[in-house]
Amino acid sequence: MTDTTTAGTVQRIAFPSIGTAAVTDRASGADVRGHAAGYTAGLRAAQAETDALRARLQAEHAALTASLRADTVRRIAVLDAATNAMLSTVAPVLSDAEASVASAATDLAEAIVGYEIRASRPAVETDDGGEARITSGAETTVRRALASIDRSVPVAVRLSPADAARVADVDLPVPVVADPALRDGDAVVDLPDGILDARIATALDRARTALGVELQGVSA
């Protein structure tokens, strides 16, 4: 750029600056690097935000899962406590009811068996107009006692005095002995090495034991 004078006036002339190719390439490279750096920074910022969001969502999910699990455990504990409370109230009542029913059933069975034994002895009139008992029931008692064993083994069959008298004239395979300790319908078979207890009360006591019913004794 030079200054010239024309008719007393000074004018400034500007000459254009002509750059080299190297200068132009450097400028273009700087622009590209700047754009790349900005893009990379943007990606990193976006990745950081994504990671933060993922971490927050995972934390919320874990907290919700833990809360639901704790609530489920609490509800199960409440149901379990309620069930145990109900069972502790109902179970003893049911147990007592079952024991009462079983006891009543065995008592009823004993009464029915005793009645059937007595009823199986129909009454007949004697010569003096009195009433006597025939021996069908007592004979049945003996045969019931001998039913499960070899009849050649027993030494004797013990009956109540009344039953022994009723079968005195009956032809039986073993001797009959009167035992005051026995009731009508009871029988005890004497064996060479022990006895076979065929008393009604004994059979019912075994039934009571099997049913878990407390033995209360048998009334005479």
Image (cartoon, helix red, strand yellow):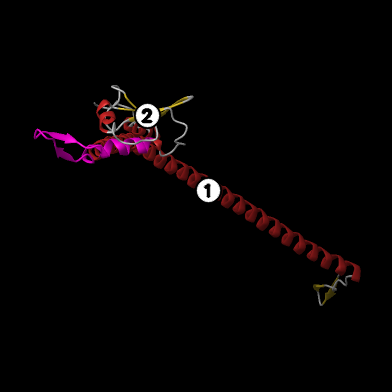
Magenta stretch, residue numbers: 117-145
Q: Say which residue appears at 57% left-offset and 47% top-offset.
A: 59
Residue placed under numbered mark 2 in the picture: 175
Identity, as a three-letter code, of the amino acid under mark 2: Pro
Residue 48 at least partly seen? yes
Instruction: From the top left corner, tell me how far across and down residue 165 is, in percent.
Output: 26, 29
How packed is label 1: few (under 14 Cα within 10 Å), some, or many (20 or more)? Answer: few
Q: Say which residue appears at 65% left-offset and 53% top-offset.
A: 51
How packed is label 2: few (under 14 Cα within 10 Å), some, or many (20 or more)? Answer: few
Compared with residue 45, is residue 95 higher up or lower down, i.e. above or below? above
Q: Is residue 67 magenta?
A: no
Q: Is residue 161 left or right of residue 87?
A: left
Q: Is residue 159 left or right of residue 9?
A: left
First of labels 2, 1 by sequence position: 1
Residue placed under numbered mark 1 in the picture: 65
Viewer-proximal residue among 110 and 213 = 110
Instruction: From the top left corner, tell me how far across and down residue 184 is, in percent.
Output: 26, 30
* Mark carried by residue 201: none
Q: Is residue 130 magenta?
A: yes
